[in-house]
Amino acid sequence: MFVKSLKLLGFRNYIEAAIEFNQPKTIIIGKNAQGKTNLLEVIQILSHVKSRRASRDSDLVHFDLGEAIIHATAERNQEELEIALLIRRSGKRTLKINEISHKPNELLHHIFSVSFMVDDIEIINGSPSRRRDWLDSVIAQLDFGYKDKLTKFEKILAQRNSFFKELVEAGSYYYRDLNTSQQDQLMVWDELYIAAANDVTGLRANFIMELEPIAARYYSEISGSDTVLALDYMGMQIDQEALEEVRARDFARGYSNVGPHRDELKFLLNGSLASSFASQGERRSITLAIKLAELELHKTKHGEYPILLLDDVLAELDEDRQDYLLESVNPQTQVIITTTHIGKHLEKWSENAQIMEIEAGRVMGTSSEATLCYDIA
Ligand SMILES: Nc1ncnc2c1ncn2[C@@H]1O[C@H](COP(=O)(O)OP(=O)(O)OP(=O)(O)O)[C@@H](O)[C@H]1O
Ligand SMILES: [Mg+2]
């Protein structure tokens, strides 16, 4: 998987920019707030549809402009790909892949990337919903049916919750208050809910099962110890009995209390919960191990390594871990690293890397006229 070029128009602080990638290794260098992360965000959007930093599409559009265009060329399994994405402030997107229109979610299936950002340590330290977001975004790239299953579950969850709220508003606080028709309706919602929830939970459980041994192997290599990293996924398959157990709470809160939206995932080192006991360095090592494991799963599923995006993370790792990360990545993998300066660790790695300097939303050494005139609307 290789992104060959990017053209940006009105994306974040890039008014107009054209970038050609000509080496597997790229170092994007620039002072703070120049547009380094924005550039990686482009590739994240091309592969994951959404960016974790932007809550709305209007955030992605340059402050002074009405819309943003991303135009990318890439090569995947020896096939050429051309992607054009128009992002409007309204949130309506237009996507063309090889000049054919597609739904925006189709982006999930073409360009694959794994990113490692400074705040990824929140996968360990943050809330359960942060871990679920991570699971969802990774699995959506590995299993093409996952996104639809997740969306279906979320829809049914919202409808089932509204059904509970309506019952409570109509004065039915307990199951025994329901008339026969309401009981039948609840049964239908339960059946739909169980099937949709178990689809999501099953795929998450499979993913963890596949990821865990690879991440554990990486962890022991990174730490140079016998410490065992384990991932304990607390999502369970549900059935009618499970729903009945929480029925009183569902009525009381007008909310479905069991299901994948409440799942938790725990990271354990030798059986102890990492978020309570692990040092900062150990947490970073866990994050590094799971990211390297993600790369391997991509290779297994798609026959190629995805693009690896490293956003200023080297500074967070000690020298051994920096070396481990840079040396353990397969040389054919396209790696794009952002940094404010090329330190000792990057010097060696930068020997045959393309170095790109970014200043105030401009890629130095390129002409802004080299850019776009792409008809996508
Ligand atoms: N929609 C937008 N329109 C114009 N500028 C924006 C928009 N969104 C973000 N910016 C600006 O883009 C600039 C660069 O952001 P970016 O996160 O890419 O910086 P960076 O080079 O990664 O810096 P750092 O080294 O601090 O991480 C910021 O100053 C930010 O205010
Ligand atoms: Mg940044």
Image (spheres, grey):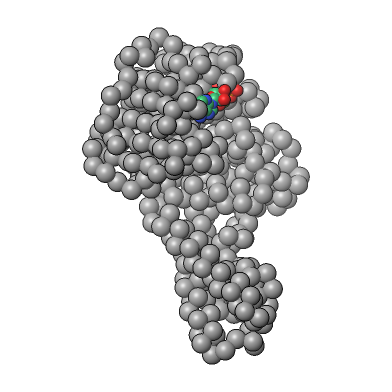
Residue extending farthest bottom: 180
Residue 152: image location, x then y, percent: 44, 62
Decide if residue 114 is on the left or right side of residue 96. right
Q: Which sits in the foreground, 365 or 93?
A: 93
Residue at x 67%, y 69% (from the top left corner): 253
Which quadrant holds residue 119? top right
Position of the C terminus, as image quadrant, is top left
| Residue 298, visible in the rendered structure | no
Residue 197: image location, x then y, percent: 51, 66
Residue at x 36%, y 11% (from the top left corner): 367
Q: Quadrant of ligand 1?
A: top right
Residue 96: image location, x then y, percent: 28, 39
Does residue 353 lie above or below 160 as drawn?
A: above
Residue at x 43%, y 54% (from the top left corner): 147
| Residue 281, visible in the rendered structure | yes
Q: So how many labels did they put on this image?
A: 0
Residue at x 62%, y 60% (from the top left corner): 262
Which quadrant holds residue 17? top left
Q: Which sits in the foreground, 30 or 280?
A: 30
Q: Which sits in the foreground, 275 or 103?
A: 103
Residue 211: image location, x then y, percent: 51, 49
Decide if residue 290 is on the left or right side of residue 356. right
Residue extending farthest top: 365
Q: Which sits in the foreground, 147 or 310?
A: 147
Residue extending farthest right: 277
Position of the N terminus, as image quadrant, is top left
